[in-house]
Image (cartoon, grey):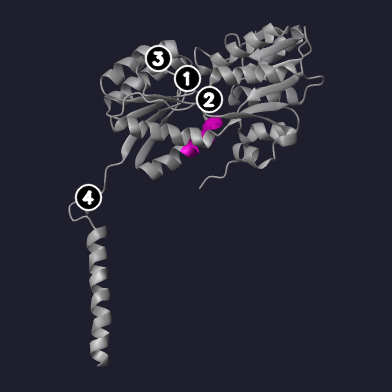
């Protein structure tokens, strides 16, 4: 009797185990791992440290979506020309897709048009090149972000005072931010000067030259790399103008906490990287241009930087 009961319990259990194994093992694909999708990431700066959180988002998406990333940085002074060469080389070597952070949309448009027409999809970050065939653009609304930074600077710059806009950008999304801020500030009765490095000048040298020649109430930087340099320069300067900017690196957060930076426009950089790889995978799968909603951004000051939602932007915890 006991043996009969045991058989009645054990046999069905063994049958269920066998069925589970049959359902979970694909006899056709077993032993044949799926090929990872190859995605090339083209930075626009040789120092990509300001993109570290974006990169973390990309790497997490690559793990989740079965992709392999190859990160490439320009090494010379003519970044647009080098990005063109990298675009052509990566397309020729057979990468499945390219994530591009454009240095100059006018200089890169024709190359993007050629390689996308030949079958290599391109997704951009920060600068829209959909007119040249790019499948999607990941980033904030640059005009809205520039206007927000201009509005923030109005609070620290009385009517008639000078606001310096740091301008190291070519024709790209950063330049869109600068133009939007300039229009808003001038319409509100502020004087505006664009501070740009000349020749081999660094941004710090250009700022020293500019502030020695004119008195400014505020300085605005429009990307994280410029904001870090501006904060380092102004931190030790007496009677420094108020500093506003865009970007949310760890260095920027430290300067914000010290009040060297008055306020920043911050977006979720981890999400930007994750969405960029996701868009590249969709493009590889054959989807034509598709709309991606602009990333939201928030203005963060010292007094609200440790609110829970802002902490997620300034101090992201990745898995």
Percent x, y of residue 178: 59, 14
Tag 1 secondary structure: loop
Q: Which residue is mark 1?
A: 127
Q: Please name whichever residue, 113 or 232, is drawn nearer the observer in this view of the structure.
A: 113
Q: Are marks 1 and 3 in contact (CB under 8 Å)?
A: no
Q: Residue at x 64, y 26 (%)?
A: 228
Percent x, y of residue 56: 49, 39
- State how far apart marks 2 and 4 are (Cα): 40 Å
Look at the image and give the residue range highlighted in magenta. 49-57
- State how far apart marks 2 and 3 are (Cα): 21 Å
Q: Please name whichever residue, 313 or 199, is drawn nearer the observer in this view of the structure.
A: 313
Q: Which residue is mark 2?
A: 140
Give the mark nearer the N terminus: 3 vs 4: 4
Could you say which quadrant of the image residue 205 lies in? Answer: top right
Numbered disc in front, either 1 or 2: 2
Tag 3 secondary structure: helix
Percent x, y of residue 156: 77, 18
Q: Which residue is mark 3?
A: 108
Give the mark nearer the N terminus: 1 vs 4: 4
């Amino acid at each position: 009797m006991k043996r009969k009961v045991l058989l009645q319990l054990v046999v069905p259990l063994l049958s269920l185990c066998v069925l589970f194994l049959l359902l979970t093992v694909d006899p056709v694909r077993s032993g044949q791992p799926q090929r990872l999708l190859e995605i090339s990431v083209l930075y626009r700066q040789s120092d990509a440290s300001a993109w570290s959180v974006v990169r973390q988002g990309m790497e997490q998406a690559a793990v989740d979506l079965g992709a392999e990333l190859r990160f490439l940085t320009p090494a010379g002074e003519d970044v647009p020309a080098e990005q063109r060469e990298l675009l052509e080389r990566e397309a020729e070597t057979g990468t499945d897709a390219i994530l591009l952070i454009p240095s100059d949309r006018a200089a890169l448009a024709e190359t993007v048009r050629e390689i996308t027409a030949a079958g290599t999809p391109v997704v951009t970050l920060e600068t829209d090149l959909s007119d040249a065939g790019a499948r999607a653009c990941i980033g904030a609304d640059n005009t809205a972000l520039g206007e927000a930074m201009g509005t923030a600077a109005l609070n620290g710059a009385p009517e008639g005072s000078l606001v310096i806009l740091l301008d190291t950008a070519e024709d790209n999304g950063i330049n869109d931010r600068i133009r939007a801020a300039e229009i808003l500030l001038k319409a509100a009765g502020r004087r505006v000067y664009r501070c740009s490095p000349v020749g081999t000048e660094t941004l710090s040298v250009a700022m020293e030259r500019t502030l020695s020649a004119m008195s400014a109430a505020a300085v605005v930087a429009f990307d994280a790399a410029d904001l870090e340099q501006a904060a380092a320069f102004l931190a030790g300067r007496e009677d420094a103008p108020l500093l506003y900017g865009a970007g949310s690196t760890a260095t920027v957060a430290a300067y914000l906490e010290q009040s060297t930076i008055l306020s920043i426009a911050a977006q979720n950089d981890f999400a930007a990287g994750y969405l960029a790889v996701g868009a590249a995978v969709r493009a590889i799968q054959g989807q034509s241009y598709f709309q991606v909603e602009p990333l939201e951004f928030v203005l963060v000051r010292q007094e609200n930087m440790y609110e829970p939602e802002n902490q997620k932007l300034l101090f992201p915890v990745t898995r």
